[in-house]
Image (cartoon, rainbow, N blue to C red):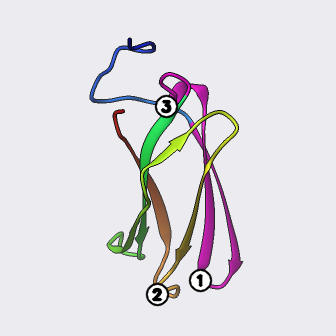
Amino acid sequence: MFRGPVPVEARDGDWKITYRKPQNNIWSLQLYGHDTAMVNNEARVQPTLLVYDEHEKVIQVDRGALSIVTRGSCINMQLTIDEPSQARNMAVLLKQVPS
């Protein structure tokens, strides 16, 4: 039995993202799902990190593994930037994966 919001293709959910740059070209990110991102108290997502240069051209893509996030847990990702001198912006895409 399905409990939760009516399933639709477009789904909004709140996520908290924290990041650290402990070394020159290695970034560490943590993704925390809010209750609005959960269905049946869990979120099944596949994260993807996109790195852009100053001309908004994608210069690096890092796709994470399918992860299940519950209350009190998070997704940890580390990204080594291949061209740190060219990297200007980063975007995080979260693809919801049905159970």
Q: Nearer the viewer, residue 59 or 29?
A: 29
Q: Count up the numbered dots.
A: 3
81 shown above or below 62: below
Is 23 positioned to the left or the right of 82 in the image?
right
Give the mark nearest the N terminus, 3 or 1: 3
90 shown above or below 31: below
64 shown above or below 68: below
- Asked if the residue at tag 1 contacts the one at tag 3, i.e. Cβ–Cβ closer than 8 Å, the answer is no
Q: Amino acid at mark 3?
A: Gly
The residues bearing labels 1 and 2 have C-alpha atoms spaced at a distance of 8 Å
The residues bearing labels 3 and 2 have C-alpha atoms spaced at a distance of 32 Å
**On residue 83, which mark appears?**
2
Residue stretch rendered in magenta on the structure: 15-41
**On residue 25, which mark appears?**
1
Residue 72 on image: x %, y %: 70, 38
Give the structural element (helix, strand or loop) at label 3. loop
The residue carrying pointer 2 sits among few (fewer than 14), some (14 to 19) or many (20 or more) residues within 10 Å by Cα, namely few
Is 87 positioned to the left or the right of 35 in the image?
left
